[in-house]
Image (tube, helix red, strand yellow):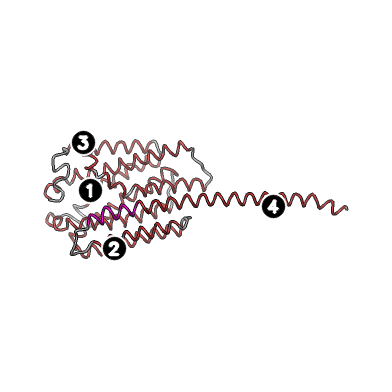
Amino acid sequence: MSTVKNYLSLVKFSHTIFAMPFALIGFVLGIAALKNNNIHLQTNEVVIRFCLVLVCMITARSAAMGFNRYLDRHFDQLNPRTAIREIPAGIIKAEKALGFVIANALIFIIATYFINPICFYLAPVALFVILFYSYTKRFTYLCHLVLGVGLSLAPIGAYLAVTGVFDILPLLFSFAIIFWVSGFDIIYSLQDAEFDKSLALYSMPSHWGVEKALSISRVFHFFSGVFLWTAYFLGDFHWLYLIGVILFNSMLVYQQSIVKPTDLSKVNLAFMTANGIASIVFSIFVITSIFLNFFLLLFWWHVLFCLSVLVDNKLYKISNLLPCLYFG
Protein backbone atom coordinates (compact mmCIF):
# COMPACT_ATOMS: atom_id res chain seq x y z
CA MET A 1 0.00 0.00 0.00
CA SER A 2 2.85 2.37 0.83
CA THR A 3 4.38 1.66 -2.61
CA VAL A 4 1.17 2.71 -4.34
CA LYS A 5 1.05 5.83 -2.19
CA ASN A 6 4.64 6.67 -3.12
CA TYR A 7 3.93 6.40 -6.84
CA LEU A 8 0.75 8.47 -6.50
CA SER A 9 2.85 11.09 -4.74
CA LEU A 10 5.52 10.84 -7.44
CA VAL A 11 3.04 11.86 -10.14
CA LYS A 12 1.07 14.27 -7.91
CA PHE A 13 -2.15 12.39 -8.61
CA SER A 14 -4.20 15.12 -6.91
CA HIS A 15 -3.23 17.48 -9.75
CA THR A 16 -5.38 15.37 -12.08
CA ILE A 17 -8.24 17.74 -11.19
CA PHE A 18 -6.73 20.34 -13.54
CA ALA A 19 -7.25 18.54 -16.86
CA MET A 20 -9.71 15.74 -16.03
CA PRO A 21 -12.80 18.00 -15.82
CA PHE A 22 -12.02 19.37 -19.28
CA ALA A 23 -11.72 15.82 -20.60
CA LEU A 24 -15.23 15.20 -19.23
CA ILE A 25 -16.43 18.33 -21.04
CA GLY A 26 -14.92 17.05 -24.29
CA PHE A 27 -16.55 13.65 -23.79
CA VAL A 28 -20.02 15.11 -23.12
CA LEU A 29 -19.63 17.50 -26.07
CA GLY A 30 -18.91 14.47 -28.24
CA ILE A 31 -22.05 12.65 -27.03
CA ALA A 32 -24.12 15.78 -27.71
CA ALA A 33 -22.60 16.17 -31.19
CA LEU A 34 -23.53 12.59 -32.09
CA LYS A 35 -27.09 13.04 -30.83
CA ASN A 36 -27.45 16.24 -32.86
CA ASN A 37 -26.51 14.18 -35.93
CA ASN A 38 -29.01 11.44 -34.98
CA ILE A 39 -26.22 9.02 -34.07
CA HIS A 40 -26.97 7.16 -30.86
CA LEU A 41 -24.41 5.06 -29.02
CA GLN A 42 -25.52 2.14 -26.91
CA THR A 43 -25.24 2.74 -23.16
CA ASN A 44 -22.65 0.00 -22.74
CA GLU A 45 -20.56 1.51 -25.55
CA VAL A 46 -20.65 4.93 -23.87
CA VAL A 47 -19.58 3.39 -20.56
CA ILE A 48 -16.72 1.46 -22.19
CA ARG A 49 -15.42 4.51 -24.05
CA PHE A 50 -15.71 6.62 -20.92
CA CYS A 51 -13.65 4.08 -18.96
CA LEU A 52 -11.05 3.95 -21.74
CA VAL A 53 -10.82 7.77 -21.74
CA LEU A 54 -10.25 7.69 -17.97
CA VAL A 55 -7.50 5.09 -18.43
CA CYS A 56 -5.88 7.26 -21.12
CA MET A 57 -6.06 10.38 -18.96
CA ILE A 58 -4.56 8.69 -15.91
CA THR A 59 -1.80 6.81 -17.74
CA ALA A 60 -0.81 9.72 -20.02
CA ARG A 61 -0.54 12.08 -17.09
CA SER A 62 1.30 9.50 -14.97
CA ALA A 63 3.79 8.93 -17.78
CA ALA A 64 4.33 12.67 -18.22
CA MET A 65 4.75 13.43 -14.52
CA GLY A 66 6.90 10.37 -13.88
CA PHE A 67 9.17 11.28 -16.78
CA ASN A 68 9.43 14.86 -15.52
CA ARG A 69 10.50 13.64 -12.08
CA TYR A 70 12.95 11.18 -13.63
CA LEU A 71 14.54 13.74 -15.94
CA ASP A 72 14.74 16.49 -13.29
CA ARG A 73 16.02 14.25 -10.49
CA HIS A 74 19.49 15.86 -10.40
CA PHE A 75 18.06 19.39 -10.33
CA ASP A 76 15.51 18.36 -7.69
CA GLN A 77 18.32 17.07 -5.50
CA LEU A 78 19.98 20.51 -5.51
CA ASN A 79 16.79 22.47 -4.84
CA PRO A 80 15.79 22.57 -1.13
CA ARG A 81 12.11 22.80 -2.12
CA THR A 82 12.20 19.65 -4.26
CA ALA A 83 14.90 17.59 -2.54
CA ILE A 84 12.16 15.76 -0.60
CA ARG A 85 10.60 14.38 -3.79
CA GLU A 86 10.55 10.59 -4.12
CA ILE A 87 13.52 10.08 -6.46
CA PRO A 88 16.08 12.49 -4.91
CA ALA A 89 14.97 11.37 -1.43
CA GLY A 90 15.66 7.73 -2.37
CA ILE A 91 12.05 6.59 -1.81
CA ILE A 92 11.74 5.45 -5.45
CA LYS A 93 14.77 4.42 -7.50
CA ALA A 94 15.32 6.26 -10.79
CA GLU A 95 15.22 3.09 -12.90
CA LYS A 96 11.94 2.03 -11.30
CA ALA A 97 10.46 5.45 -12.01
CA LEU A 98 11.49 5.09 -15.66
CA GLY A 99 9.92 1.62 -15.78
CA PHE A 100 6.74 3.15 -14.35
CA VAL A 101 6.78 5.74 -17.15
CA ILE A 102 7.23 3.10 -19.88
CA ALA A 103 4.45 0.92 -18.42
CA ASN A 104 1.99 3.83 -18.36
CA ALA A 105 2.91 4.88 -21.89
CA LEU A 106 2.26 1.35 -23.17
CA ILE A 107 -1.08 1.10 -21.36
CA PHE A 108 -2.04 4.47 -22.85
CA ILE A 109 -1.30 3.30 -26.41
CA ILE A 110 -3.13 -0.02 -25.86
CA ALA A 111 -6.18 1.82 -24.50
CA THR A 112 -6.33 4.10 -27.56
CA TYR A 113 -6.29 1.01 -29.81
CA PHE A 114 -9.61 -0.07 -28.30
CA ILE A 115 -11.18 3.39 -28.71
CA ASN A 116 -10.92 4.12 -32.44
CA PRO A 117 -8.27 4.31 -35.21
CA ILE A 118 -7.68 8.09 -35.09
CA CYS A 119 -6.98 8.02 -31.34
CA PHE A 120 -4.59 5.12 -31.86
CA TYR A 121 -2.75 6.82 -34.73
CA LEU A 122 -2.42 10.08 -32.78
CA ALA A 123 -1.35 8.40 -29.52
CA PRO A 124 2.42 8.63 -30.28
CA VAL A 125 2.01 12.33 -31.13
CA ALA A 126 0.22 12.96 -27.83
CA LEU A 127 2.91 11.06 -25.91
CA PHE A 128 5.65 13.04 -27.64
CA VAL A 129 4.05 16.36 -26.66
CA ILE A 130 3.49 15.51 -23.00
CA LEU A 131 6.93 13.92 -22.57
CA PHE A 132 8.76 16.62 -24.56
CA TYR A 133 7.72 19.26 -22.01
CA SER A 134 10.22 17.89 -19.50
CA TYR A 135 13.11 18.88 -21.80
CA THR A 136 11.92 22.41 -22.54
CA LYS A 137 13.22 24.09 -19.37
CA ARG A 138 16.68 23.33 -20.74
CA PHE A 139 16.36 25.49 -23.85
CA THR A 140 13.23 27.73 -24.02
CA TYR A 141 11.34 30.26 -21.91
CA LEU A 142 8.16 29.05 -23.60
CA CYS A 143 8.20 25.86 -21.51
CA HIS A 144 5.02 27.04 -19.75
CA LEU A 145 3.15 27.12 -23.06
CA VAL A 146 4.40 23.62 -23.94
CA LEU A 147 2.94 22.36 -20.65
CA GLY A 148 -0.31 24.09 -21.58
CA VAL A 149 -0.36 22.36 -24.96
CA GLY A 150 0.13 19.00 -23.23
CA LEU A 151 -2.85 19.46 -20.92
CA SER A 152 -4.93 20.99 -23.72
CA LEU A 153 -5.07 17.59 -25.41
CA ALA A 154 -7.62 16.46 -22.79
CA PRO A 155 -10.85 17.87 -24.33
CA ILE A 156 -9.71 17.18 -27.91
CA GLY A 157 -8.75 13.59 -27.09
CA ALA A 158 -12.01 12.87 -25.23
CA TYR A 159 -14.05 14.39 -28.07
CA LEU A 160 -12.16 12.31 -30.64
CA ALA A 161 -12.75 9.20 -28.54
CA VAL A 162 -16.50 9.70 -28.96
CA THR A 163 -16.86 11.18 -32.45
CA GLY A 164 -13.64 10.28 -34.27
CA VAL A 165 -13.49 13.79 -35.81
CA PHE A 166 -12.15 17.23 -34.88
CA ASP A 167 -14.47 20.16 -34.19
CA ILE A 168 -14.20 23.84 -33.29
CA LEU A 169 -15.69 23.71 -29.77
CA PRO A 170 -13.21 21.27 -28.18
CA LEU A 171 -10.42 23.20 -29.92
CA LEU A 172 -11.62 26.43 -28.27
CA PHE A 173 -11.58 24.73 -24.88
CA SER A 174 -8.08 23.47 -25.65
CA PHE A 175 -6.85 26.98 -26.43
CA ALA A 176 -8.43 28.17 -23.18
CA ILE A 177 -6.49 25.45 -21.33
CA ILE A 178 -3.20 26.39 -23.01
CA PHE A 179 -3.37 29.96 -21.69
CA TRP A 180 -4.90 28.99 -18.35
CA VAL A 181 -2.23 26.37 -17.60
CA SER A 182 0.60 28.55 -18.93
CA GLY A 183 -0.59 31.38 -16.69
CA PHE A 184 -0.71 29.35 -13.50
CA ASP A 185 2.53 27.49 -14.31
CA ILE A 186 4.30 30.85 -14.48
CA ILE A 187 2.91 31.61 -11.01
CA TYR A 188 4.09 28.22 -9.73
CA SER A 189 7.59 28.71 -11.16
CA LEU A 190 8.00 32.05 -9.34
CA GLN A 191 9.21 30.20 -6.26
CA ASP A 192 12.15 28.73 -8.22
CA ALA A 193 13.11 31.86 -10.16
CA GLU A 194 16.49 32.34 -8.45
CA PHE A 195 17.30 28.63 -8.43
CA ASP A 196 16.51 28.30 -12.16
CA LYS A 197 18.63 31.34 -12.90
CA SER A 198 21.60 29.96 -10.97
CA LEU A 199 21.53 26.70 -12.99
CA ALA A 200 20.75 28.40 -16.33
CA LEU A 201 17.33 26.74 -16.50
CA TYR A 202 14.72 28.45 -18.64
CA SER A 203 11.52 29.97 -17.26
CA MET A 204 9.83 33.32 -17.67
CA PRO A 205 10.39 34.38 -14.04
CA SER A 206 14.11 33.49 -14.21
CA HIS A 207 14.52 35.40 -17.48
CA TRP A 208 12.26 38.46 -17.12
CA GLY A 209 11.91 38.65 -13.38
CA VAL A 210 8.95 38.08 -11.06
CA GLU A 211 7.02 41.27 -11.82
CA LYS A 212 7.13 40.96 -15.61
CA ALA A 213 6.38 37.23 -15.43
CA LEU A 214 3.27 37.96 -13.37
CA SER A 215 2.15 40.47 -16.01
CA ILE A 216 2.56 37.82 -18.72
CA SER A 217 0.59 35.38 -16.57
CA ARG A 218 -2.27 37.90 -16.34
CA VAL A 219 -2.29 38.33 -20.13
CA PHE A 220 -2.41 34.55 -20.59
CA HIS A 221 -5.34 34.25 -18.18
CA PHE A 222 -7.14 37.04 -20.01
CA PHE A 223 -6.85 35.10 -23.29
CA SER A 224 -8.06 31.95 -21.53
CA GLY A 225 -11.24 33.79 -20.65
CA VAL A 226 -11.59 35.11 -24.20
CA PHE A 227 -11.58 31.57 -25.63
CA LEU A 228 -14.18 30.40 -23.11
CA TRP A 229 -16.48 33.32 -24.02
CA THR A 230 -15.93 32.58 -27.71
CA ALA A 231 -16.99 28.98 -27.13
CA TYR A 232 -20.26 30.24 -25.64
CA PHE A 233 -21.09 32.38 -28.66
CA LEU A 234 -20.20 29.64 -31.16
CA GLY A 235 -21.70 26.75 -29.20
CA ASP A 236 -25.26 25.89 -28.32
CA PHE A 237 -25.05 26.30 -24.54
CA HIS A 238 -27.60 26.99 -21.83
CA TRP A 239 -27.23 30.28 -19.93
CA LEU A 240 -25.75 28.28 -17.02
CA TYR A 241 -22.54 28.16 -19.06
CA LEU A 242 -22.19 31.92 -18.49
CA ILE A 243 -22.24 31.42 -14.72
CA GLY A 244 -19.49 28.81 -15.11
CA VAL A 245 -17.34 31.22 -17.16
CA ILE A 246 -17.85 34.05 -14.69
CA LEU A 247 -16.89 31.83 -11.74
CA PHE A 248 -13.89 30.42 -13.61
CA ASN A 249 -12.62 33.88 -14.51
CA SER A 250 -13.26 35.06 -10.95
CA MET A 251 -10.95 32.33 -9.65
CA LEU A 252 -8.27 33.43 -12.13
CA VAL A 253 -8.61 37.03 -10.92
CA TYR A 254 -8.44 35.79 -7.33
CA GLN A 255 -5.22 33.83 -7.83
CA GLN A 256 -3.63 36.79 -9.58
CA SER A 257 -4.63 39.08 -6.71
CA ILE A 258 -3.09 36.99 -3.91
CA VAL A 259 0.34 36.58 -5.53
CA LYS A 260 2.48 39.71 -5.54
CA PRO A 261 6.09 40.32 -6.60
CA THR A 262 6.96 41.14 -2.98
CA ASP A 263 4.93 38.29 -1.44
CA LEU A 264 5.05 34.76 -2.87
CA SER A 265 3.77 33.07 0.30
CA LYS A 266 0.42 32.24 -1.32
CA VAL A 267 1.74 30.66 -4.52
CA ASN A 268 0.58 27.17 -3.54
CA LEU A 269 -2.88 28.49 -2.62
CA ALA A 270 -3.11 30.18 -6.01
CA PHE A 271 -1.72 27.17 -7.86
CA MET A 272 -3.57 24.24 -6.28
CA THR A 273 -6.70 25.47 -4.53
CA ALA A 274 -7.82 28.25 -6.88
CA ASN A 275 -7.19 26.27 -10.08
CA GLY A 276 -8.69 23.07 -8.70
CA ILE A 277 -11.91 24.89 -7.74
CA ALA A 278 -11.97 26.77 -11.05
CA SER A 279 -11.68 23.60 -13.13
CA ILE A 280 -14.24 21.53 -11.20
CA VAL A 281 -16.86 24.28 -10.84
CA PHE A 282 -16.57 25.30 -14.50
CA SER A 283 -16.95 21.72 -15.74
CA ILE A 284 -20.05 21.19 -13.58
CA PHE A 285 -21.76 24.24 -15.07
CA VAL A 286 -20.72 23.43 -18.65
CA ILE A 287 -21.80 19.78 -18.51
CA THR A 288 -25.10 20.74 -16.83
CA SER A 289 -25.58 23.36 -19.54
CA ILE A 290 -25.08 20.78 -22.30
CA PHE A 291 -27.55 18.33 -20.71
CA LEU A 292 -30.16 21.03 -20.08
CA ASN A 293 -29.92 22.22 -23.66
CA PHE A 294 -30.33 18.67 -24.93
CA PHE A 295 -33.41 18.02 -22.78
CA LEU A 296 -34.91 21.40 -23.69
CA LEU A 297 -34.34 20.59 -27.36
CA LEU A 298 -36.00 17.21 -26.83
CA PHE A 299 -38.93 18.86 -25.03
CA TRP A 300 -39.56 21.40 -27.79
CA TRP A 301 -39.22 18.71 -30.44
CA HIS A 302 -42.01 16.76 -28.74
CA VAL A 303 -44.12 19.93 -28.45
CA LEU A 304 -43.70 20.66 -32.16
CA PHE A 305 -44.43 17.04 -33.01
CA CYS A 306 -47.67 17.12 -30.99
CA LEU A 307 -48.68 20.42 -32.59
CA SER A 308 -48.01 19.02 -36.06
CA VAL A 309 -50.18 15.98 -35.27
CA LEU A 310 -53.00 18.26 -34.07
CA VAL A 311 -52.71 20.43 -37.17
CA ASP A 312 -52.71 17.35 -39.42
CA ASN A 313 -55.86 16.05 -37.70
CA LYS A 314 -57.59 19.42 -38.12
CA LEU A 315 -56.65 19.58 -41.78
CA TYR A 316 -57.86 16.01 -42.27
CA LYS A 317 -61.24 16.85 -40.75
CA ILE A 318 -61.55 20.01 -42.86
CA SER A 319 -60.63 18.10 -46.02
CA ASN A 320 -63.35 15.56 -45.26
CA LEU A 321 -65.86 18.33 -44.61
CA LEU A 322 -65.19 20.30 -47.79
CA PRO A 323 -66.86 17.83 -50.25
CA CYS A 324 -69.99 17.85 -48.08
CA LEU A 325 -70.13 21.63 -48.15
CA TYR A 326 -69.50 21.73 -51.88
CA PHE A 327 -72.13 19.18 -52.89
CA GLY A 328 -74.59 20.19 -50.23
Q: Residue type at mark 2: give it.
A: Arg
Which residue corresponds to mark 4? 311
**Sequence order check, earlier mark of 3 and 1:** 3
Report the Cα–Cα distance between label 2 and label 1.
24 Å
Say if the magenta span includes residue 272: yes
Q: Which mark is residue 218?
A: 2
- Whichever of labels 3 and 2 marks the residue nearer the N terminus, that label is 3
Residue on which the image places disc 3: 2
At which x and y percent is residue 239?
Answer: 46, 58
Horizontal side of 202 relative to 15 (left or right) equals left
C-alpha separation, residue under disc 2 versus residue under disc 4: 57 Å
Tell whether label 4 touches label 2 (CB within 8 Å).
no
Range of the magenta residues? 267-279
Give the Cα separation between the discs numbered 4 and 3.
Answer: 70 Å
What secondary structure is marked by label 4?
helix
Within 10 Å of disc 1 (Cα), the crowding (few <14, some 14-19, many 20+) is many
Who's the residue at 38% across and 38% down the image? 51
Residue at the location (87% across, 52% down)?
327
Q: Which mark is residue 196?
A: none
- How far apart are the two marked residues, 4 and 1, measured between alpha carbons? 65 Å
Mark 2 or mark 1, whichever is nearer to me:
2
**Which circle's residue, 2 or 1, is located before the other in the chain?**
1
Q: Main secondary structure of the magenta part?
A: helix
Position in image of residue 84 (x %, y %): 14, 45
State which mark lies toward you, 3 or 1: 3
